[in-house]
C-alpha cells in the first residue's frame, strides 16, 4: 500500500491521499493520482470495481467474489478461501506442507491432519512422498485375528482378467518386517507367482520400501521397481507398481492395469 505523496510502483495498491479510497497506480512516480475508479466516498475492491460498501471479511455472506476482501472467493454465498488456501486471520495463504506448524486441520494440505500443532499423516499412515498411505500395521492386525484367506483379482487393459487365491494369508508385525505368509494357491493365472519357491518368491519375504531394503538382491528392488513389495531378488509379482508402469504377475501379464487384493476370515 502506498499513498500519493510517496513513490509508488505501477499497479501498486494505493489510497487517494489519506482517505480510505482504494485504487491502483496507473503509472509509477511521486504525487501521481490513484486510478479513480470510485466516487469520493466509495471503496474500490481488488478488481477495481466500485462498491459503496466496505469489502466483506471471512465467513460473511456474499453474492459476488468482488464483495469479498482480497484473496477470498464467494463460495456457496460465503466469503471463503480457495480450497488450496487457509484463512490466516487476515488473508488467505497457501495450505501448509508436511511438518509445518498448524492450529487446525484446515491449515494443512489436503493429505495431512494437524496433529500436536504439526501437519502430519494420521498415526496409522505413512508419507510416501506424494500421499499419506496406510501402514501395513492395519493389515497385520486384521490378518492375525483368526485365520484368513486371500483372493486377488487382476485385469489387463483389454479387460482380460484372472484370479489367484490362497487358502492362508498372514502378515507379520513391524518388528518382523511384515513378512508375508501365503499357502495353497488356486486360480487361473497359470502360475503361483507369490509362492513360486525360487528367486522371485514373495512368500516368506519381508516387506521392502525404497528406504528399507529387506530383499535378497544385492541391489534395491523397491527403488528399481518404484514400489513397496515383498521383494526377493526381485519379483514374480508386483501389484504396487505405479499405474503408468503397470502391475505384474509372472507368466501371465506385465500390463495389469487393475487389481483387487482381498482377505476374509474363514
Ligand atoms: Ca538388497
Image (cartoon, rainbow, N blue to C red):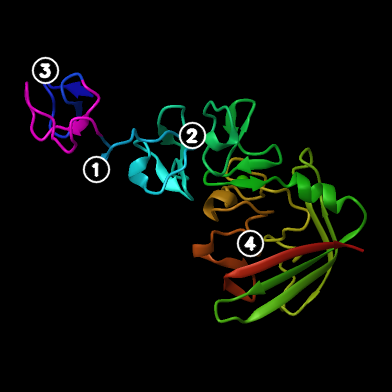
Q: Mark 3 near mark 2, Cβ–Cβ under 8 Å?
A: no
Query: Spatial distance from mark 1 to mark 3, Cα to Cα?
Result: 24 Å
Badge 3 or badge 2: first in the primary sequence: 3
The residue at the point 84 percent across, 51 percent down is 142
Badge 1 or badge 2: first in the primary sequence: 1
Residue behind label 4 places its C-beta within 8 angstroms of ligand 1: no
Residue 144, position as x, y percentages in the image: 88, 50
Q: Secondary structure at mark 4?
A: strand
- Residue depth check, mark 1 versus mark 2: number of the one nearer the observer: 1
* Residue identifier under label 4: 238
Locate the N terminus and report the quarter of the image it occupies: top left
Q: Over which residues does the magenta segment extend? A: 19-42
* Residue identifier under label 2: 96
Query: Spatial distance from mark 3 to mark 2, Cα to Cα?
Result: 38 Å
Q: Secondary structure at mark 1?
A: loop
Residues 265 and 19: in front is 19
Within 10 Å of the Cα at label 2, are there few (<14), some (14-19), or many (20+) other Cα atoms? many
The residue at the point 54 percent across, 30 percent down is 99
Q: Mark 1 near mark 3, Cβ–Cβ under 8 Å?
A: no
Badge 3 or badge 4: first in the primary sequence: 3
Residue behind label 3 places its C-beta within 8 angstroms of ligand 1: no
* Residue identifier under label 1: 49
Amino acid at each position: 500500500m502506498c499513498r500519493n505523496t510517496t513513490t509508488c510502483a505501477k499497479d501498486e495498491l494505493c489510497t487517494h491521499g489519506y482517505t480510505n479510497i482504494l485504487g491502483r497506480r496507473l503509472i509509477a512516480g511521486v504525487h501521481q493520482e490513484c486510478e479513480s475508479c470510485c466516487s469520493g466516498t466509495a471503496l474500490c475492491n481488488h478488481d477495481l470495481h466500485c462498491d459503496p460498501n466496505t469489502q466483506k471479511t471471512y465467513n460473511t455472506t456474499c453474492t459476488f467474489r468482488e464483495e469479498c476482501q482480497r484473496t477470498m472467493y464467494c463460495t456457496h454465498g460465503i466469503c471463503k478461501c480457495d480450497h488450496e488456501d487457509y484463512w490466516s486471520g487476515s488473508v488467505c495463504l497457501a495450505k501448509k506442507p508436511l511438518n509445518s506448524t498448524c492450529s487446525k486441520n484446515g491449515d494443512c494440505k489436503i493429505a495431512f491432519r494437524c496433529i500436536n500443532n504439526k501437519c502430519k499423516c494420521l498415526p496409522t499412515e505413512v508419507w510416501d512422498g506424494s500421499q499419506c498411505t496406510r501402514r501395513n500395521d492395519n493389515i497385520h492386525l486384521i490378518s492375525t485375528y483368526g485365520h484368513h484367506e486371500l483372493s486377488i483379482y487382476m485385469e489387463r487393459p483389454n479387460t482380460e482378467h484372472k484370479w489367484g487365491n490362497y487358502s492362508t494369508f498372514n502378515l507379520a508385525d513391524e518388528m518382523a518386517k511384515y513378512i508375508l505368509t501365503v499357502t495353497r494357491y488356486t486360480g487361473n493365472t497359470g502360475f503361483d507367482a507369490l509362492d513360486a519357491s525360487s528367486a522371485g518368491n514373495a512368500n516368506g519375504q519381508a516387506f521392502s520400501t525404497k528406504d528399507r531394503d529387506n530383499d535378497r538382491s544385492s541391489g534395491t528392488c523397491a527403488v528399481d521397481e518404484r514400489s513397496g513389495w515383498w521383494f526377493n531378488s526381485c519379483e514374480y509379482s508386483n501389484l504396487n507398481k505405479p499405474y503408468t508402469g503397470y502391475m505384474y504377475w509372472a507368466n501371465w501379464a506385465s500390463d495389469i492395469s487393475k487389481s483387487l487384493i482381498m482377505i476374509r476370515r474363514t
